[in-house]
Image (tube, rainbow, N blue to C red):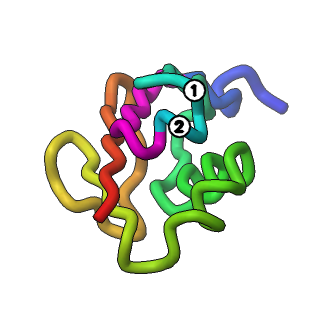
Amino acid sequence: MKPNNILKSIKVKICYNKDLKMITHRDFEDAVVSEGLDFVNFLNFIFTSYPDIINKFPPGTLGFTLNGKVPKVDDVLKDGDILEFTTA
């Protein structure tokens, strides 16, 4: 692999509300991921890390914003992004 093809790492802050804090045991965490990661794969990573989130909060009861806006499926994460989770 050529040096200019190496992916850089980026840091994304994940914020959890009080309901999710019961599962994650934290208000927020910083995730270091590869540059170019899209929102859906990042979300899958979080659900894999905390499977109780999807068990306790079925579709329609979990919400999230990326930098204060509703994320699109194909949004690509950038260094310094903030993902906030909410629950209904």
Label pair 1/2, CB-CB below 8 angstroms: yes
Q: Residue at x 61, y 31 (%)?
A: 33
Q: Secondary structure at mark 1?
A: loop
Q: Can you name the residue that lies furthest to the bottom here?
A: 59
The secondary element bearing badge 2 is classed as helix
The magenta segment is: 10-20
Across and down, in percent, residue 18 comes to 36, 37
Where is mark 1, residue-wise?
A: 25
Residue 80 point in image, percent of width and height: 33, 23
Screen quadrant of the N terminus:
top right
Q: Is residue 62 shown left or right of residue 20?
A: left
Q: Is residue 80 magenta?
A: no
Q: Nearer the viewer, residue 67 or 14?
A: 14
> Gap in Å between the C-alphas at discs 1 and 2?
6 Å
Q: Residue at x 37, y 71 (%)?
A: 61
In the image, what residue occupies the spot 48% across and 34% down?
Answer: 21
On the image, numbered disc 2 is attached to which residue?
22
Instruction: Please report the residue visible at 54 percent of the width from the left and 35 percent of the height from the top.
Output: 35
